[in-house]
Image: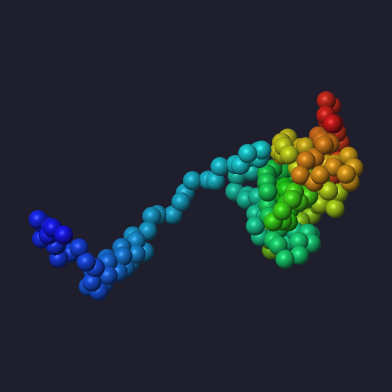
Amino acid sequence: MQPSAVPELAHAHTRPIHWLATATAVAAVVALSSVLQPGAATAAQAAGPGTKSAPAPAGLAAPDPAHVAFPLECGPVEAVVKKKASGDLDGDGRPETVAVVHCDAPMGTPPDGVYVLTRALDDGRPRVVATLADPRDGTTVGDFAVRDGAVAATLLGYSSADVPRCCPDVSSDVKWRWENGAFVRSTPAGARSA
């Protein structure tokens, strides 16, 4: 075996001092990053796909669905807000929020519920005041929007129990509007069904 022409470098072998120096450097970076934080975010969150909101009256915040207990039985999993949109649905000048919610099932396509939220007059907390689509009906929500004082949605369902729950084969466009103290469901002209 021929000896190497280059002498062995001292730093080629790791020693405890090398590990100590690396750990110290990492700790310094972590400590420095916890001190130097960016300023608070000021931009509004962009609306997600299929979510359209009517502008809220100035100074009044729409109810936040993150602070509401929805009437869903989800067992060990949580309820998830899939879509939300806000607008004044009853003409009182205060915005309501409409939330599409389902259980966070690990498999399959869980059915959606569509709920209307408003703020309580006494303490301002958001609460559910109406169920427009019940998850027990087994439908999911496709397109969804709040416009001109109405809630419009495409409900996707199943023509029979034999249709796999991954693949809805029935579709209907529906609209809910506040009339005489209740939400009234209608099917807009030109609605489709498969």
Who's the residue at 71% across and 49% down the image? 99
What x and y, as percent, mark residue 155? 80, 40
Residue sitting nearer the eye, 150 or 173: 173
Residue 144 placement, left or right of 5: right
In the rendered image, the residue lying farthest to the right is 160
Residue sitting nearer the eye, 30 or 40: 30
What x and y, as percent, mark residue 121? 73, 59
Query: In which quadrant is the C terminus drawn?
Result: top right
- For the image, the number of numbered tags is 0
What x and y, as percent, mark residue 120? 73, 59
Residue 19, compared with residue 105, is above or below; it is below
In the rendered image, the residue lying farthest to the front is 1
In the rendered image, the residue lying farthest to the top is 190
Residue 107 placement, left or right of 45: right
Residue 43, compared with residue 12, is above or below; it is above
Query: In which quadrant is the N terminus drawn?
Result: bottom left
Quarter occupied by residue 74 = bottom right
Who's the residue at 84% across and 27% down the image? 189
Who's the residue at 72% across and 43% down the image? 88
